[in-house]
Each structure stands twice: as C-alpha cells, then as structure tokens.
C-alpha cells in the first residue's frame, strides 16, 4: 500500500484544522472558567505573580520556537515548497507555538480556580488567545 506524500497544501489544511480546535478549546476554557466558577475572591497576589512569571516564560519559549524552528523552515519552503526536510520543522514550530499559547490560557483558567478574580485571569486569556489569533497558519 503506497504511503501518502506529505505536501505543503495538505499540511496547511491539517494545521488549520488543528489550529481551529485549539483556538476553540481556548475560548471554551475562558467561558467555562468565567461562567461556571463563582467564588469569594482570595488574596492570591503571590500566586498571581508566580503565574505571571510562568506565563512570561511560556510566551518567551513560544516566540523562540517561532524564530528558531518555524521561520527558517518557512524560508526554505518559500524557495522549494516540496522540501520534506523543511515541512516537518514548519509543522512542529506551528504546533509548539500554538500549544504554548494555549497553555497561557490554561494558566488563566487555573488561576481562576485557585481563587483568583476575573481581572487577574483576563491578561492570560488576552495574551493566549491574542497569540493564537496572530499566529494563524499561513502559507510560507
């Protein structure tokens, strides 16, 4: 049985499906946390600072993967769109950056469940979903 050849067009289509699922999940996390969980807010300033530091590290990692993995692969694919050696890092760079952006949203979700207020969680939602929207899978 012949193996399916991975092409740029097939990859873009599958990456957009994965992207849509991840973005929908991020929006669902936001709605679930804010719609289902109402509690007496606690003073979690120290925890919030730890979550914030973690979020900054995650965003830095996501940007690093975009520049070190995705960008060189995208440049190779611009010259030769059927380059299998560049297609895998392009897919990996996209997936890693989206998953890291998703984890920022999950930090806001977790913060809400540890006693944080909506206003403490909103920056995590905005940054995570904002990065997801900014990093829509484009043709290299």
Image (cartoon, rainbow, N blue to C red):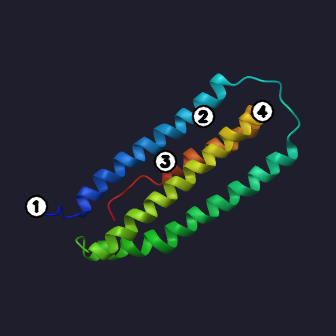
- Side of 133 relative to 46 (left or right): left
Mark 3–mark 2 contact, CB under 8 Å?
A: no
Q: Residue at the spot x=75%, y=50% of the render? A: 51
Q: Earlier in the sequence, mark 1 or mark 4?
A: 1
Q: Which residue is at the far left?
A: 1
- Side of 129 relative to 56 (left or right): left
| Residue 1, x across and y down, in percent | 10, 61
> Which residue is denoted by mark 1 in the rendering?
1
On residue 117, the disc is 4
Q: Earlier in the sequence, mark 2 or mark 4?
A: 2
Q: Earlier in the sequence, mark 1 or mark 2?
A: 1
* Up/down of 18 relative to 42, above or below: below
* Up/down of 6 relative to 134, above or below: below
Mark 1–mark 3 contact, CB under 8 Å?
A: no
> Which residue is denoted by mark 2 in the rendering?
30
Q: Earlier in the sequence, mark 3 or mark 2?
A: 2
> SS of the residue at dot 3?
helix
| Residue 129, x across and y down, in percent | 55, 44
Q: Earlier in the sequence, mark 3 or mark 4?
A: 4
> Which residue is denoted by mark 3 in the rendering?
133
């Amino acid at each position: 049985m012949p193996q399916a050849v991975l092409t740029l067009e097939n990859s873009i289509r599958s990456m957009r499906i994965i992207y849509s699922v991840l973005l929908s999940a991020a929006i669902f996390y936001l709605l679930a946390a804010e719609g289902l969980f109402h509690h007496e807010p606690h003073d979690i300033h120290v925890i919030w600072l730890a979550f914030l530091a973690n979020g900054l590290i995650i965003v830095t990692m996501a940007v690093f993967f975009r520049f070190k993995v995705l960008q060189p692969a995208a440049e190779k694919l611009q010259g030769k769109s059927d380059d299998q050696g560049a297609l895998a890092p392009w897919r990996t760079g996209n997936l890693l950056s989206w998953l890291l952006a998703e984890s920022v949203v999950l930090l806001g979700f977790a913060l809400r469940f540890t006693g944080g207020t909506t206003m403490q969680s909103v920056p995590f939602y905005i940054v995570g979903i904002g990065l997801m929207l900014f990093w829509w899978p484009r043709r290299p």
